[in-house]
Image: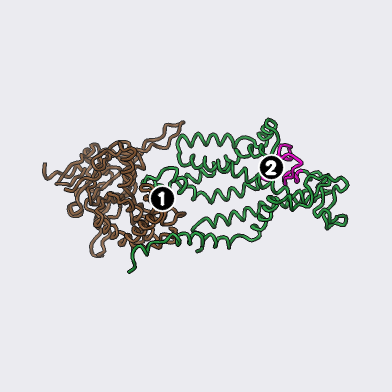
Chain colours: A green, B brown
Amino acid sequence: MANTSMQIVSPTTLWAVRVRSVLGGLRRAPKIPSLVLLVFMIFAAFGQWIAPYSPVAVDMAASFSPPVWHEEGSADHLLGTDKLGRDILSRLIRGARVSLSLSLFVIGLGGGVGVVLGLISGYSGGKVDAVMQRGIEVILAMPTILVALVFVFAVGRSFESVILILSPFLAARFARIVRGETLSVRERDFVAIAKVIGTPTWMILLKHILPNVFNTIIVLATLEVGHLILLESSLSFLGVGVPPPQPAWGLMVADGREFLTSAYWITLFPGLCILAAVLSLNLFGDWLRDTLDPRRRQL
Amino acid sequence: MANRLLEVEGLAKHFRGGGNWLSSGGDSIRAVDGVSFSVEEGETFALVGESGCGKTTVAKMILLLERPTRGAISFQGKDVSSFRGGSLREYKRLVQAVFQDPYSSLNPRMQVLDIIGEPLRVHQGMRGRDLRMRVGELLENVGLNPVTASFFPHQFSGGQRQRIAIARALALRPRLIVLDEPVSGLDVSIRAQILNLLVDLQRDLGLSYLLISHDLAIVEHMSHRVGVMYVGKMVELATRDEFYGNTLHPYSNALLSSVPQPDPDVPMGTTIGGEVASPINPPSGCRFHTRCPIYLETNMCREVEPEWREILSEHLTACHKVEPAVV
């Protein structure tokens, strides 16, 4: 019979289980969405060295050149140019940074705040919950675009002001959904047991509630990225989004709208980028959700 | 007699009916309405009754998950409601719980090490090698292999999960464990194993149990004393042998005779009809009179609430029809 302490699970075993499950999860990551997101992230990080032209370089002589596979297209501008002769490909590559970082910042800031508020609201219940929920309803009842218009006119048009104005709306959506999930998780027996043990409330929220509402948060976050890119384009269209001539995908779609029949490429390619990013993020989010759930892991 | 560990005196819990700020709400639900009993050092006190009779609410109040409307709980002679800070922590260390559903009582996102380790971390700040050693020891105590500490709950069967829940309850060397239907959620074939484990642990560690169950066979196997509840009230309290040998209250009799006997030649006892009375609007007088087989249309049973009396030594009941042997 071995010494008892020999049988005690070793820290390496504990970590091996965790590491193996992460590696196993990575192997099952969706290939194409991961690749798409990786490419967009590289564009966002190193766009200024990859893009063949400056995204704001105007060349009126080359305006409305079609993509290379058209008869009039030239290899100088692979995806054509817009009405000011700016290279679409370069603008897409540089626009990745604006569109993706805007979404990430808003989700990080708004989503983070929303999750914390939702956890507190759902877990405390009673008056705290009632007051917070009325506040959230006020925010959700406000028309996003109108509020953004007023805010941007007051504060000035910039990347930061777009983040600041979109974050509270996102926070409200997150808070509402996380609260609902929290209400159901807090009734589970392991939360009651944690209270019996005397686990501090912040630890109950962090270790028992949060990991069990994480699925919802991931799914919501990936869905909201698409929503945010579209919101950004609506704001740009109304002239209160990311200020031109900075390239952003939504802005580019809005720019090309007038020429949809004559120069479809101005709108099509940024539209495809938005589609690819949103779809990839959703598929990636599904995978992340499954990987983080111990029940779905295969060891 | 052994030392009194936990004493419950006139405990009541009334839930407010579903009202909001527009309507003051319906009648309150009197889930528990004046229950008194005690748990001695090293004994198992069983609380039995049909579902909805308030057993679990009593347990929740003892575990400080619900605040009593009336009545007092004292632990080792001290009033639990006066506990603050250090004394509250001490109470939460000495009183632990095992719940019915082992699928809901273990966090699916935690490894067993973290589940059993939670009380040790919270109360003793234990970590690293000490924690792993202690968790391994606890797993062995409940008959599981210590290497399973790295597993997640879904990798275990129901019985094994309940063993993990028991190991977690034992971690802080408590004095009292509240067992709320500890085997009702398990396959019949596993129940005996878990019950025997609980009995062994009680013997080895000198634990006290408050066993909440509707299963009279389990209660007979495990308990030293038995209390029967009906619609928020205690109707009979006796030592196990007294209870099973000399039942006084007609409700207890009906419960006992409804236990199926393994011998097909033994006829089924007299069972009672009807539904459990509603705690929203409990019957007047004796709450059991609507279903009582010995109720004879006397105004007494219908109008006067029966007194909680000691009929025999250590055998209390609340029934007009039972006369005390010693006055």
Residue lying at 31% horizontally and 43% vertically, measured from the top left: B91
What secondary structure is marked by label 2? helix
Residue at the left extreme of this rendering: B326
Residue pointed to by mark 2: A232
Locate residue B211 relative to residue A168 in the image: left or right: left
Task: Please tell me whether residue A249 belongs to the stretch shown in magenta.
Answer: yes
The residue positioned 21% from the left and 45% from the top of the image is B4
Q: Which residues are magenta?
A: A228-254
User: Image quarter for residue A105?
Assistant: top right
Q: Quadrant of residue B113?
A: bottom left
| Residue found 31% across the figure and 38% down from its top | B83
Given residues A97 and A36, the one toward you in this image is: A97
Assign a secondary structure to mark 1. helix
The disc numbered 2 marks a residue on which chain? A
Mark 2 neighbour class, 10 Å CA radius: few under 14, some 14 to 19, many 20 or more: many
Could you say which quadrant of the image residue B33 lies in?
top left
Please tell me which residue is depicted at 37% across the width and 50% down the height of the picture.
B119
The reply to whether residue B216 is visible in this rendering is yes
Crowdedness of circle 1 by 10 Å Cα count: few (<14), some, many (20+)? many
As drawn, the label of residue A71 is none
Give left or right: position of A42 versus B252: right
User: Circle 1 marks a residue in which chain?
Assistant: A
**Residue assigned mark 1:** A190
Pinpoint residue B171: horizontal percent, then vertical percent: 34, 53
- Disc 2 residue type (three-letter): Glu
Residue A30: give x, y in percent of width and height.
62, 60
The residues tagged by marks 1 and 2 sit, at their Cα atoms, a distance apart of 42 Å
Tell me the amino acid under the disc marked 1.
Phe
Q: Nearer the viewer, residue B120 or A299?
A: B120
